[in-house]
Image (cartoon, helix red, strand yellow):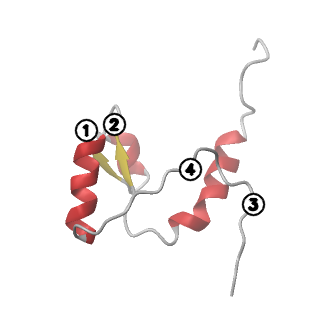
Amino acid sequence: RRGNAYHGSHPFFMWYWGESGRQHAGHVIAAGAENAHVPAMMAWERADNLTEAIAMARSYTGSSAEITMLHQPIIAIADLE
């Protein structure tokens, strides 16, 4: 309205760009989600905070679980064979 909003198609682009990675993920845990409804609609799990999310992840992967944080989204996706 005042030139500070994303275009209406933006959420779909964001979903599309992340879908390749989600296809390889066993679980997605939304840490700190304000309600359980939205993560459930997306077939994600929900944790109240990051500590709980890490404990949930360790229950799936064991104590050798690793965390990766990207400071900016990857725009290009490479498909290596």
Q: Which percent across, then down, holds residue 57? A: 28, 60
Q: Residue furthest top?
A: 2
Q: Nearer the viewer, mark 4 or mark 3?
A: 4
Q: Which percent across, then down, holds residue 23? A: 52, 70
Q: Which residue is identified by label 2?
A: 32
User: Viewed as shown, does residue 11 lie left or right of 62?
Assistant: right
Q: Which residue is identified by label 1?
A: 48
Q: Which residue shows up at 50% across the image and 72% down it?
A: 24
Dot 4, how many residues are within 10 Å of its Cα: few (below 14), some (14-19), or many (20+)? few
Q: Residue furthest bottom?
A: 81
Discs 2, 1 touching: Cβ within 8 Å: yes
Q: CA distance from mark 4 to mark 3?
A: 14 Å
Q: Which three-letter amino acid code belongs to the residue tagged 3?
A: Ala
Q: Which residue is identified by label 4?
A: 70
Q: Nearer the viewer, mark 4 or mark 1?
A: 4
Q: Which residue shows up at 70% across the image and 40% down it?
A: 10
Mark toward the start of the polypeptide (2 vs 1): 2
Q: Which three-letter amino acid code belongs to the residue tagged 2?
A: Gly
Q: Which three-letter amino acid code belongs to the residue tagged 4?
A: Leu
Quarter location, residue 62: bottom left
Residue 76, numbered circle: 3
Mark toward the start of the polypeptide (4 vs 1): 1
Q: Which residue shows up at 28% across the image and 49% down it?
A: 53
Q: What element does badge 1 sit on?
A: loop
Mark toward the start of the polypeptide (2 vs 3): 2
Quarter location, residue 17: bottom right
Q: CA distance from mark 4 to mark 1?
A: 21 Å
Mark toward the start of the polypeptide (4 vs 2): 2
